[in-house]
Image (tube, rainbow, N blue to C red):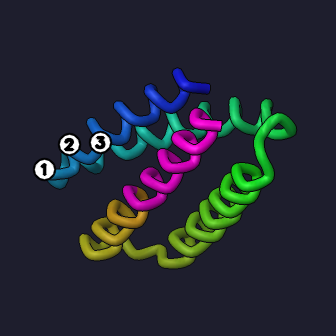
Amino acid sequence: MKNVYQVNYWSVLITILLSLTFWGGIIALPILGTIQIVISLIIINKFKTLTKANRILFTSYTVLTVFLIIFFKQLKGEELGVLFMWAIVSLFLACFHLYITYNISKS
């Protein structure tokens, strides 16, 4: 799981750096999302071996992600403000995922 954290760490770092330019972030966020989906599938595969705290964190992350997907699907606006809000929320969600993989790698 240490390698999973390292991949996630570098992916998030590169995405944050690319997000300093707005369009770089828009391009990098879907790539980061794909990487984090693969990492989440790995975590789900090893879910029973996680500590209780990590299971709660990961479940919270999953519920929050589903809620945010539903929320942003309801907005249906393609305004720049909605796109900016989506990018900021996605970065915070990515950092939460990074925190979870960090905790898992340390346990």
Element assignment for label 2: helix
Looking at the rendering, the stretch of residues picked out in magenta corresponds to 91-107
Query: Where 75 falls versus 17 (above or below)?
Result: below
Any mark on residue 18, and which? 2
Residue carrying label 1: 21
The answer to whether marks 3 and 2 mark residues whose Cβ atoms lie closer than 8 Å is yes
Q: The residue under label 2 is which amino acid type?
A: Leu
Give the percent coordinates (x, y) of residue 10.
35, 31
**Residue behind mark 3:** 15
Q: Helix, strand or loop at disc 1?
A: loop
Q: Nearer the viewer, mark 1 or mark 3?
A: 3
Sort mark 2 into few (<14), some (14-19) or many (20+) by Cα contacts within 10 Å.
some
Dot 1 alpha-carbon crowd within 10 angstroms: few under 14, some 14 to 19, many 20 or more:
few
Quarter of the rendering containing residue 80: bottom left
The answer to whether marks 2 and 1 mark residues whose Cβ atoms lie closer than 8 Å is yes
Query: In the drawing, what numbered circle is on residue 5?
Result: none
